[in-house]
Structure formats: structure tokens, C-alpha cells
Image (cartoon, rainbow, N blue to C red):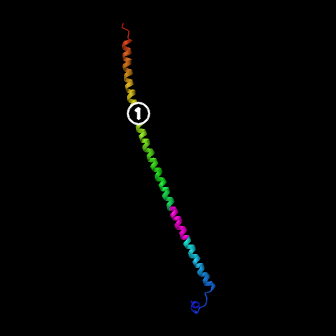
Amino acid sequence: MRREVSGEPPSHKNAASIGSHSERELERDHEDHQGEWAREEQQVMIFFLLMQHFQVLSLRQMMIREQDRTIDSIAGTLSTLAQQAGLMGREIGEQVEYVSIFTCDPK
């Protein structure tokens, strides 16, 4: 401070320490920006991973709904086939009765 008041030029040591101080601040600012960038990048990655996860869940839910519809359709078809098989069984029973009536020996 006395040198500044007396008009003497600042020593190189003080100028170097001021310069290195500024460099340290710049490095610290740079590191802060890099850290902030890394945090933002992580947040974006997390966001995209969550979006992918929700898309996968949505696709799975759509597939499950489609499978449910298919299973319901198959169940309806099986029910119809069971009804038809029952009718065929009754008709065959009636046909067996008719055949036995007409093929009996009249002795």
C-alpha cells in the first residue's frame, strides 16, 4: 500500500500473486461450470431414462390389454366349441337310437 501511495510501481511478486489469484478464480469458476454442466447432464439423462421406462411400461400395458382381449376371444371360441360338441353328442345319441330301432330283429 505504501508503494502505491509513494508512486512506486507494484512489485512483480504482488502482480504475480494478483494474476495467480485471478487464474485460481477462473479455474474455480471453470470447475463450478463443469460441475453444473455435469449435474444438468445427469438430470437430462435421468429424465430420458425415466421417459424410456414409462414408454416400456406403457408398451407392456398395451401388450397386456391386447393379450387380455385375445384370451377373452379364445375363451368365447372355446365356449362355442363346447356348446357345439354338446349338441353333436346329443345328435349322435339320437342317431344311435334311430339306428337301433330300425336294425332290430322283429323276431
Image height of 41 relative to 89, above or below: below
Occupied quadrant, residue 68? top left
- Tell which residue pokes out farthest to the right in this image: 12
Residue placed furthest toward the top: 107
Relative to 59, say whether 75 is above or below: above
Q: Residue furthest bottom?
A: 6
Quarter of the image holding residue 73? top left
> Quick one: 25 or 100, which is closer to the camera?
25
Q: Quadrant of the N terminus?
A: bottom right
Residue type of the residue flagged with mark 1: Thr
Most frequent secondary structure within the magenta stretch: helix
- Name the spot of residue 65 as percent of width and height, x first: 42, 44
42, above or below 6, in the image: above
What is the number of callouts on the image?
1
Q: Which residue is more in the foreground, 68 or 93?
A: 68
Mark 1: give few (<14), some (14-19) or many (20+) Cα within 10 Å. few
Q: In the rendering, at what x and y percent does residue 35 appear? A: 54, 67
**Where does residue 87 sit, x and y in percent of width and height?**
37, 25
Residue 73 lies in the magenta stretch: no
Q: Is residue 36 magenta?
A: yes
Residue 90's x, y, as percent? 37, 23
Q: Residue visible at 36% across and 17% down?
A: 97
Tell me which residue sits at (39%, 30%) in the image. 82
- Secondary structure of the residue carrying tag 1 is helix
Quadrant occupied by the C terminus: top left
Which residues, given as a range, are shown in magenta?
31-42
The residue at 38%/14% (across/down) is: 100
Image quadrant in which you'd find residue 6: bottom right
Q: Which residue is mark 1?
A: 77
